Image (spheres, rainbow, N blue to C red):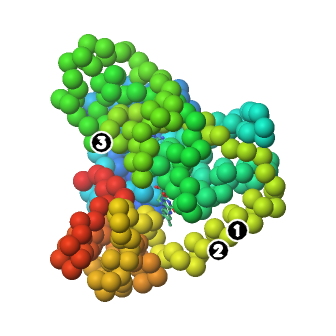
Amino acid sequence: MKIIDVCQKLSEEIPAGQIYMNEPMNKHTSFKVGGNADIFVKTKNIDELKHVIKIAKKTNNRITIIGNGSNVLVKDKGIRGIVVNIDFENIKFEDGENGEVFVTVGAGISLALLSQELLKRGISGFEFASGIPGTIGGAVKMNAGAYGSEMKDIVVSTKCLDLKRYNMLTEKTYIDDIELEEIIKRSDEPEIVELTNEKQEFSYRESVFFNKRYVILETKLKLEYGNVEDIKLKIEEFSKSRKENQPSFPSAGSTFKRGDNYITAKLIDECGLKGKKIGGAMVSEKHAGFIVNTGEATAQDIIDLINYVKNEVLEKKGKVINLEIEIIGE
Ligand SMILES: Cc1cc2nc3c(=O)[nH]c(=O)nc-3n(C[C@H](O)[C@H](O)[C@H](O)COP(=O)(O)OP(=O)(O)OC[C@H]3O[C@@H](n4cnc5c(N)ncnc54)[C@H](O)[C@@H]3O)c2cc1C
C-alpha cells in the first residue's frame, strides 16, 4: 500500500495535523541528522496509539517508537514504515503518607516540563533529571540518570502496551523470534500490562524495555514534598554544571557508556581525540564523551567517527567501549 493511503487510513482517527509524510528526522532528533521517515505520527493518547498500531499491522508496516529523539542517531536513508512519537502529557498527583507524593505521568511529558510542574508544587526528588532533554518514556527505557540518581530510584510502576503478544512488527524485532507459545497466546488487541519497578529490571542505562516489545504509556513516580527554594537551587546548580561541562553543539549526550572501572570520556581524552573531526562530526573539545554535529554532519560522519574512536581506544588503551546512544534506521 502506498504511503499516502496509509496516511489516509491513519487520518480516520487521528487529526491530519499530527501525521507527516516523508518527514525529515533531523527535525525530531537532538543530533539534528537523519533521513526521512516514511510516516511520522504524533499520538496524544492511547486510542490514537492503538489506531496507529492497528493500521501498521494491517498494512504490514514496521513501527519505531520515539520520544524527544535525544538518545538516538537516525541513519541518512531514514526510517521505513511508521515512526510513532509518544506525546501523552497526562499528569496526576496523589498524596501518600509522611510527605510522600505519587506522581503518575504520561510517557511523552518532557523531563524539563515535569520538573517545572514539580517545582511549582514543592515536590522534591526529581531535580537530578531536570536537565536531561528527554521524555519520561525515553528516560524509563534508558534508566536515565545524572548527579548520582537514576530513574530506577523513583519509578514505582510503568504501564505499557505489549506489542509482542499482538504479533506486531517493530524496528528491531522480527516475526520469527516469536516462540510458539506466544503465537498461541496472541491476542486481537495489544494488551496493557503494568510492571513493578523490579519487573523493569533497571541497571546502568539498561531496562527490560530493550528486550521486550513494550510501548511505555505512563509511569508512576514516588517523590516527596520539600522546600521550593531548595528544589529551585538544586535545579539551578545542575543546570549551571551542565552549561559549564557540556558542549552546546547538537549531540545525543554521552555517546558511549561509562566502563565498570574506568571513565570512557577520560580514556578518549587520553588518546588525544578531543577535536578529532570526520566530516561535520567532531569529538567535543569541551567533553570527550560527546560526539557533536558541528553543523553539516551526516549520520555516516558520526558513525565513522564513533568507529574511529572505538578503534583508537581499543588500540591505545585495550578497552572495548560500548555505545549509550542507539543507531536506528537505514
Ligand atoms: C545534551 C544532552 C544531555 C544528556 N544528558 C543525559 C544525562 O545526563 N543522563 C542521561 O541518562 N541521558 C542524557 N542524555 C540522553 C537522553 O536525553 C536520555 O537518554 C533520554 O532519557 C532519552 O529520552 P528521549 O525521550 O529523547 O528518548 P528517544 O531518544 O526518543 O528514545 C530513546 C529510546 O527510548 C525508546 N522510547 C522512547 N519513548 C518510548 C516509549 N514511550 N515507549 C517505549 N520506548 C520508548 C526509543 O524507541 C529509543 O529506543 C542527554 C542527551 C543530550 C542531547
Q: Is residue 106 left or right of residue 40?
A: right
How far, Cα to Cα, is label 2 from label 1? 6 Å
Question: Residue 236 shows which numbered tag?
Answer: 1
Circle 2: residue type: Lys
Residues under numbered marks 2 and 1 in contact, where contact means CB atoms less than 8 Å apart? yes
Tell me the residue that label 3 is attached to. Answer: 171
Q: Residue at x 23, y 66 (%)?
A: 320
Categorize mark 2 by other alpha carbons within 10 Å: few (<14), some (14-19), many (20+): few
Circle 1: residue type: Glu
Confirm or reject: label 2 Cβ below 8 Å from ligand 1: no
Q: Nearer the viewer, mark 2 or mark 3?
A: 2
Circle 3: residue type: Glu
Residue 87 visible in the shown view: no
Tell me the residue that label 2 is attached to. Answer: 240
Looking at the picture, does residue 103 appear above or below residue 75?
above
Confirm or reject: label 3 Cβ below 8 Å from ligand 1: yes
Residue 194 percent across, percent down from the top left: 50, 26
Tag 2 secondary structure: helix
Tag 1 secondary structure: helix
| Closer-to-camera residue (248/22) | 248
Residue 316 visible in the shown view: yes
Residue 122 percent across, percent down from the top left: 79, 50
